[in-house]
Image: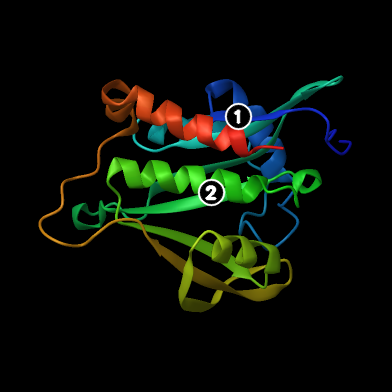
Amino acid sequence: MTHPATDQKATLRFATELDMKEIARIYALYIDTPITFDEQPLSAQDFLVRFSQTKKLFPWLVIEQKDECGTHLLGYAYAHPQHERAAYRWNAETSIYLDPHATGRGFGTLLYDTLLNLLRLLGYKMAYALVTLPNPASEQLHRACGFHLFGTQVYAGYTCGAWRDVAWLTKQLGSFEGTPQTPQSLEILAKQSPLHIKALLDEANARIN
């Protein structure tokens, strides 16, 4: 893949089922590194299953760009439950991946800021992210987006010929005062506050390029 043309406008939007092939392509670029902890590429169908299980509850975001070769994704970010047990339901775990050719242009920060704003709007209190160490670019991105290290899981997994540590990063999204309301699903929020969601996406797209 060639470097995305810098004179072509990129767009941040919600992911659809049609994006799973491109999402799988980007993820596969990291399979031969310690970053994913997967050792085989995931297919578009694998991502479609994951997407179908969480899309009504959590945001999936992509940044796409159109050029003379067509439309391709520059990166994606999404959230999912941190744990399954009920008392954890105010926590969300986040993931973000960029096409390596699209780094250094602020897309990671843009995706993450928008994802976190949506999670805050849904009523989540904490966001969690796991980062295989060392990964200076990801660590810097998370710091820039307000995450803080709260612990390191040493020898968390063996991949790419070595034992790897994983940093656990957190960001507070909401207040802990009073009795919390259960977070809304994205599906319900989209019906109740479509203009609010549109405003978040419009704000994000105004920052691109």
Residues 44 and 88: in front is 88
Residue 62 shows up from this direction: no
Relative side of 190 to 10, left or right: left
Q: Residue at x 64, y 34 (%)?
A: 63
Residues 189 and 79: in front is 189
As measured in the structure, the alpha-carbon distance from the residue carrying label 1 to the one carrying label 2 is 19 Å
User: What amino acid does circle 2 point to?
Assistant: Tyr
Relative side of 202 to 67, left or right: left
Neighbourhood count class around disc 1 (C-alpha, 10 Å): few under 14, some 14–19, many 20 upward: many
x and y, in percent, of residue 182 in the image: 19, 45
Residue 51 shows up from this direction: yes
Q: Residue at x 29, y 29 (%)?
A: 189
Is 72 rendered above or below residue 121?
Answer: above
N-terminal of the pair, mark 1 or mark 2, is 1
Relative side of 15 to 151, left or right: right
Is 140 rendered above or below residue 194?
Answer: below
| Badge number at residue 112 | 2
State the residue lying farthest toward the left: 179
| Badge number at residue 20 | 1
Q: Quadrant of the C terminus?
A: top right
x and y, in percent, of residue 180 in the image: 15, 52
User: What amino acid does circle 1 point to?
Assistant: Met
- Mark 2 element type: helix
Is 57 rendered above or below residue 103?
Answer: above
Are the residues at dot 1 and dot 2 in contact (C-beta closer than 8 Å)? no
